[in-house]
Amino acid sequence: MEEKYIDFLKRCELYNEEVFNYIKYRTTYVDYREKGAMDFVGCYPIIEDGLVKDIWLCVPKIVDDISISINIHEYVHLLRVYRYLGKEFRESEYEELLPVMYEFAFLEEIGNTEYLNKYKEDIKDDKVLKVLLKSK
């Protein structure tokens, strides 16, 4: 399963060995299927004196395609935050757009329409993410 995840990142030119090495010991893994586990999933920059000092990640253990899609989403967040290590972090209201776009691409590629449609339903009221729903 992990090969499928890495392959997707490489094909989308997202894979970065330096980032993978950096986050290796800063990652907590959860089982997304357990109640409440998704509440902790995310990319967490540690900010001190206005600068990104460190980054921690909480993602699902890769056990199936859904866990891969969630990992893709959080990895795309990580790539953005990683560029700010030692610098001032600037958030954007468009923060979710790129991670969701790649997650959609993966789900469409593997043909998981059930989870993709549920995801689209969950974001239908988000003003920024609506652009992804209209792009088809």
Image: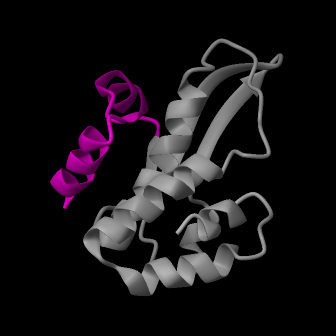
On screen, residue 3 versus residue 9, left or right, reads left
Q: Is residue 37 above or below residue 6?
A: below
Q: Is residue 109 magenta?
A: no
Percent x, y of residue 32: 46, 72
Give the quarter of the figure containing the N terminus.
bottom left
The coloring applied to the image is: one colour
Q: Which residues are magenta?
A: 1-26
Q: In front here: 81 or 92?
A: 92
Percent x, y of residue 78: 52, 37
Q: Is residue 23 magenta?
A: yes
Q: Is residue 78 visible?
A: yes
Residue at the limit of the structure toward the bottom, as seen here: 114
Identify the residue at horizontal 34%, vertical 32% (top origin).
20
Identify the residue at horizontal 20%, vertical 47% (top origin).
7
Percent x, y of residue 93: 79, 45
Q: Is residue 128 above or below residue 115?
A: above
On screen, residue 124 versus residue 8, left or right, reads right
Identify the residue at horizontal 55%, vertical 71% (top origin).
37
Identify the residue at horizontal 54%, vertical 84% (top origin).
118
Q: Toward which corner of the image does residue 127 lie, by quadrant? A: bottom right
